[in-house]
Image (cartoon, coloured by chain):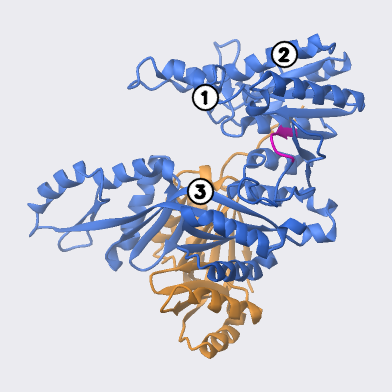
Chain colours: A blue, B orange
C-alpha cells in the first residue's frame, strides 16, 4: 500500500470551488495508485462562520472580561476542523469515493495535556491502517488530538496543537503511517524565492532542504510550519508544497543529501519578518546587568519573547513583535526596578512616552524618596515600524559573503538599516517597514534569484 | 505505533567553544559597516554575531584570525579594540522563540558566576553568548544547574 497524506488549508476549503479542487486532488492521487489520507483545516478565516477564530468568539463574546478556560477553548477551537472533515467526506462520497470523517482522537493522535499548544506523544495507527486497507479515504481533522485520560476520566480531553497545527498533523501522520509523501496544498505554486506579491519574477524552488525551509519559515516566509518540518526531518518524510488551484509540480522538501550540488550550495530566498518593534533602554553601566535580567524576567512572565538582543555596556536592546508591544509598554510603564549594592538604593522608572498613567503616579510618589534613594527616570526609545529582511542560504560558510552582498545592495539603493543579525543559514537587516519592499526586490535581483 | 512522537520544546544542548576574540570598531557613519565587513570577507576572515551600536560595530572572530583582522582594519584607517581569550557558549533549543524567559535563565546563570556577556546573538534555535575564558568553567556549571540533563559539548581549539 502506497500511502499519501494530503493536507488542505483553510483558504483552500473556504469556498465550494476550492473544496471541489481538493476533492479532485484526492481522486487524482487514487488514480496514481496511492491510498490517500486527507488532513483538513477549518474552512476560511474570521469572520467566515466556521473559521477557528469565529468559533472562539462565541465563547469570548459571552463576557469579554472573563477569560475562557483553556480546556473549553480547545474544545471549541477543534470544531472548525471537525466540520471540515464531515463536509469533505460527504463531498468525496457524492463523487463516488469511500470516505470517512475522523477527529484527531479517532485518528489515534494522542497528545500532552498542554491545551492550546499540545505536543504529539504517539499516533495509534491501527484504525487508520484498517480503514485504508478497506479502501476508505480517512478525512482527518488537523490541528487536534486527545490527551490521555486521567482517572476517573474515561476519555481524554480534546487538545489543539497550536500554530501550524494542521501542517504538524500532516507530517506526523506521514511519519507514523510511513507514507510515501506528504502534500501540503496552498494557494501558490510552491515555496518561492520571495513573496510574489512583492517580487514579480519570484520563482518556485523545485527542491529544497528541510533546513532551508525551516530557516525561511522562522524568518517570516509563509511556507510550511517549522514544527511540521522538524517532524518531517526527524522521520525522513518527503514533503511537497503544491497549489490547490493548479497542476504545477510544486516544491519538494527533502534531505540535503538528495539535492544536487548546485542546490546544496546556493542563495535560496529573500524573506521578510514584518511588524517588529525595536527598543533601546539606557541605564547606568554598573546597574545594567541587574536591570537587564529584571526586564527579561518580566517579559518571560508575560510570555513575550525578546529577540535581536544586543549587548553593550550601558544599553539594553531588544525586539518584540508589534502585537506584543502594548504589553511591553504597559509593563515598562508600571514597573520599578530597584538596584541596591550598599549605600543609597537606585530606583529605575521607565518612560515609554505613551500609556504613562502608572509611570506618572509612581514618579510623583518616588520623587518624595529623593535623598534616601536615587530615582532614575529612563526614557525608552521605541522604533515601532521595523522589518527584518533576510537572505536565506544553504551552507553556513556563505554567511560572510552574503552579509557583505546584502549591505552593498542597501548602500547602492540608499536604504539605511538599523541593525544586522546572522543565524545558521541567514543574514538579516532590520530596517524601516517602508523600505522593506524595495530592499527585497533589490536583493532578489542582486542574488539572481529569478534565474534559479 | 510511534512512541514519544514530538520532541519537547526544551533546551537540547549546550556547546562551548574556546579561542574567540571580541572586536569593537568605532565608526563615524553607519554606512561604513559594509566597507568594514567587506574588507574582512575579502581577507577570508570569519566574523560572526555582528552588532551595530551607536558609534561602533562589534563582532566575534576566531582568535587565530585576530592578527589578520587587525591588519585589515588598520589598513582601512581604524583602530579597533580587541579582547582575546574569549569563549562562545551556545544554548540550543528547537523552538527557542516559544521558550518564554529562556534569555533570562541564561543571563541569570552567567550573572551568578560574575560572567560578563560581551556579545550575544539569538536565533530561532540558539542563543550564543561570548564570555571570558576564565569564566567558562563556572558558567557551564551554572547552566547545567539551570538546564539539568542537558548534553554539554565542549570544543577546545
Which image quadrant: the C terminus of chain B? bottom right
SS of the residue under disc 1: loop
- On the image, the x and y values in percent for residue A327 come to 35, 41
Disc sitting over residue A178 in the figure: none
Q: Are marks 3 and 2 on the same chain?
A: yes
Q: Which residue is mark 2?
A: A101
User: Which of the marked residues, 3 or 2, is nearer the chain's N terminus?
Assistant: 2
Q: Residue placed at 66% from the left, 79% from the top? A: B44
Magenta stretch: give its range: A184-189
- On the image, the x and y values in percent for residue A184 come to 73, 34
The residue nearer to you, when weighing A158 against A432, is: A432
Q: Residue placed at 60% from the left, 67% from the top? A: A403
Give yes or no for residue A257 being in the magenta stretch. no
Q: Which residue is mark 3?
A: A274
Q: Is residue A449 above or below residue A228?
A: below
Res B108 visible? no
Q: Is residue A191 above or below residue B18?
A: above
Q: Which residue is mark 1?
A: A46
- On the image, the x and y values in percent for residue B38 come to 59, 77
The residue nearer to you, when weighing B85 against A337, is: A337
Amino acid at each position: 500500500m502506497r500511502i499519501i497524506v494530503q493536507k488542505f488549508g483553510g483558504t483552500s476549503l473556504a469556498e465550494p470551488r476550492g473544496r471541489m479542487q481538493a476533492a479532485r486532488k484526492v481522486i487524482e492521487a487514487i488514480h496514481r495508485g496511492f491510498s490517500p489520507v486527507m488532513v483538513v483545516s477549518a474552512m476560511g478565516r474570521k469572520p467566515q462562520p466556521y473559521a477557528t477564530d469565529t468559533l472562539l468568539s462565541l465563547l469570548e463574546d459571552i463576557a469579554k472580561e472573563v477569560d475562557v478556560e483553556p480546556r473549553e477553548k480547545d474544545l471549541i477551537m477543534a470544531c472548525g476542523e471537525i466540520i471540515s472533515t464531515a463536509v469533505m467526506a460527504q463531498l468525496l462520497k457524492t463523487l463516488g469515493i469511500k470516505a470517512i470523517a475522523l477527529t484527531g482522537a479517532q485518528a489515534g493522535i494522542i497528545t500532552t495535556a498542554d491545551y492550546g499548544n499540545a505536543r504529539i506523544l504517539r499516533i495509534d495507527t491501527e484504525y487508520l491502517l484498517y480503514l485504508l486497507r478497506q479502501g476508505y479515504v480517512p478525512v482527518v481533522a488537523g490541528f487536534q488530538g486527545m490527551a490521555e485520560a486521567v482517572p476517573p476520566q474515561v476519555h481524554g480531553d480534546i487538545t489543539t496543537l497550536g500554530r501550524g497545527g494542521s501542517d504538524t498533523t500532516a507530517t506526523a501522520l506521514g511519519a507514523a503511517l510511513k507514507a510515501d509523501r506528504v502534500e501540503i496544498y496552498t494557494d501558490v505554486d510552491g515555496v518561492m524565492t520571495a513573496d510574489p506579491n512583492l517580487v514579480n519574477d519570484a520563482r518556485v524552488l523545485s527542491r529544497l532542504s528541510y533546513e532551508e525551509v525551516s530557516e525561511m519559515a522562522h524568518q517570516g516566509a509563509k511556507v510550511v510550519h517549522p514544527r511540521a518540518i522538524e517532524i518531517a526531518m526527524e522521520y525522513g518524510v518527503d514533503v511537497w508544497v503544491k497549489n490547490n488551484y493548479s497542476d504545477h509540480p510544486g516544491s519538494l522538501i527533502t534531505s540535503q543529501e538528495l539535492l544536487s550540488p548546485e542546490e546544496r550550495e546556493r542563495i535560496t530566498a529573500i524573506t521578510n519578518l514584518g511588524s517588529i518593534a525595536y527598543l533601546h533602554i539606557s541605564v547606568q553601566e554598573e546597574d545594567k546587568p541587574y536591570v537587564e535580567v529584571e526586564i527579561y524576567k518580566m517579559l518571560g512572565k508575560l510570555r513575550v519573547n525578546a529577540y535581536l538582543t544586543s549587548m553593550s555596556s550601558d544599553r539594553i536592546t531588544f525586539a518584540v513583535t508589534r502585537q506584543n508591544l502594548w504589553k511591553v509598554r504597559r509593563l515598562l510603564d508600571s514597573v520599578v526596578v530597584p538596584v541596591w549594592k550598599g549605600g543609597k538604593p537606585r530606583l529605575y522608572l521607565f518612560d515609554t512616552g505613551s500609556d504613562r498613567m502608572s509611570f506618572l503616579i509612581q514618579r510623583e510618589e518616588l520623587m518624595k524618596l529623593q535623598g534616601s534613594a536615587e530615582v532614575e527616570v529612563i526614557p525608552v526609545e521605541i522604533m515601532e515600524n521595523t522589518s527584518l529582511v533576510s537572505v536565506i542560504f544553504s551552507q553556513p560558510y556563505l554567511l560572510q559573503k552574503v552579509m557583505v552582498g546584502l549591505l552593498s545592495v542597501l548602500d547602492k539603493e540608499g536604504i539605511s538599516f538599523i541593525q544586522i543579525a546572522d543565524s545558521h543559514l541567514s543574514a538579516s537587516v532590520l530596517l524601516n517597514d517602508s523600505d522593506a519592499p524595495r530592499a527585497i526586490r533589490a536583493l532578489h535581483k542582486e542574488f539572481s534569484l529569478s534565474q534559479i | 505505533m510511534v512512541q514519544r512522537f514530538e520532541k519537547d520544546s526544551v533546551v537540547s544542548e549546550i556547546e562551548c567553544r574556546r579561542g574567540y576574540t571580541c572586536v569593537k570598531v568605532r565608526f563615524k557613519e553607519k554606512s561604513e559597516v559594509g566597507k568594514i565587513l567587506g574588507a574582512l570577507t575579502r581577507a577570508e576572515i570569519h566574523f560572526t554575531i555582528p552588532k551595530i551600536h551607536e558609534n561602533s560595530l562589534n563582532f566575534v572572530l576566531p582568535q587565530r584570525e585576530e592578527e589578520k583582522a587587525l591588519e585589515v582594519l588598520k589598513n582601512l584607517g581604524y583602530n579597533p579594540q580587541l579582547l582575546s581569550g574569549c569563549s562562545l557558549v551556545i544554548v540550543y533549543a528547537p523552538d527557542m522563540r516559544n521558550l518564554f524567559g529562556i534569555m533570562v535563565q541564561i543571563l541569570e546563570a552567567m550573572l551568578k558566576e560574575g560572567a560578563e556577556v560581551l556579545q550575544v546573538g539569538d536565533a530561532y534555535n540558539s542563543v550564543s553568548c561570548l564570555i571570558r575564558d576564565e569564566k567558562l568553567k563556572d558558567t557551564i556549571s551554572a547552566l547545567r544547574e539551570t538546564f539539568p540533563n542537558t548534553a554539554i559539548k565542549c570544543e577546545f581549539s
